Amino acid sequence: MQVLSLRGSNLIEVLDAKGIKSLALFPAKFQKSFWIKIGSYLVVDASGRDQALESGSKVACVVSQVLFHDQVRSLEKSPEWPAVFKYSSMEKVTNLSSSSKSDLTSSLRQPQSEGCEEASGSDEEDDDLPPLEANNNRNRPFDLYSDNYDSDSDLDSR
């Protein structure tokens, strides 16, 4: 199954080989190990899918394995790979190439105009801000040792 969207709270919207969208549960044991992006491929356990849908549950399946890029590439070459996913991977590549060109040109134009605004108005924005406080979480061992060393030498000289 292919990931269509991340719903949050361990829920993922997936598309199966028949083109049917459903919700899958991403188990907590995988959360710290794997990161899922939109367009990733998964292996799910859909054994209780019909019963879950009949009972009114929106979650139809459970993720059992996340496929890595190498596994997906080898499966794409096999005849068992669904035709629905063949077209979606081609569309994704063409969409990324066209969107990356437009994003690149727009991002090149934006920083120049933003930089001019920041340079002219940066002094006015800082006037309303409170002064910065010292970070108490960061140790400064050089200052601590130098202060202690001076006070110890003063005591020894007396």
Image (tube, helix red, strand yellow):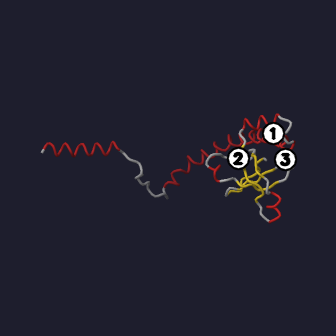
Whole-angstrom CA distance, mark 3 to mark 1, is: 21 Å
Label 3 or label 1, whichever comes before in sequence order: 3
Q: Helix, strand or loop at disc 3?
A: loop
Tell me where residue 97 appears, x and y as whole percent.
77, 38
Task: Name the residue beneath numbered marker 1.
Answer: 94
Task: Name the residue beneath numbered marker 3.
Answer: 17
Tell me where residue 13 appears, x and y as whole percent.
76, 54
Residue farthest along the front direction in this orientation? 47
**Image quarter for residue 146?**
top left
Whole-angstrom CA distance, mark 3 to mark 2, is: 19 Å
Give the amino acid type for the residue marked by disc 2 in the picture. Answer: Lys
Q: Nearer the viewer, mark 3 or mark 1?
A: 3
**Image quarter for residue 131?**
bottom left
Q: Is residue 134 above or below residue 81?
A: below
Give the amino acid type for the residue marked by disc 1 in the picture. Answer: Thr
Q: Helix, strand or loop at disc 1?
A: helix
Q: Nearer the viewer, mark 3 or mark 2?
A: 3
Residue farthest along the bottom direction in this orientation? 56
Q: Helix, strand or loop at disc 2?
A: loop
Tell me where residue 20 appears, x and y as whole percent.
84, 53
Quadrant (top left/top right/bottom left/bottom right) for the C terminus = top left
Whole-angstrom CA distance, mark 2 to mark 1, is: 18 Å
Q: Are marks 2 and 1 in contact (CB under 8 Å)?
A: no
Specify few, some or many for label 1: CA neighbours under 10 Å numbering under 14, 14-19, or 20 or more: few
The residue under the point 74% across, 40% down is 100
Tell me where residue 83 appears, x and y as whole percent.
87, 42
Left or right of 127? Residue 79 is right
Give the amino acid type for the residue marked by disc 3 in the picture. Answer: Ala
Q: Nearer the viewer, mark 2 or mark 1?
A: 2
Numbered circle sitting on residue 37: 2
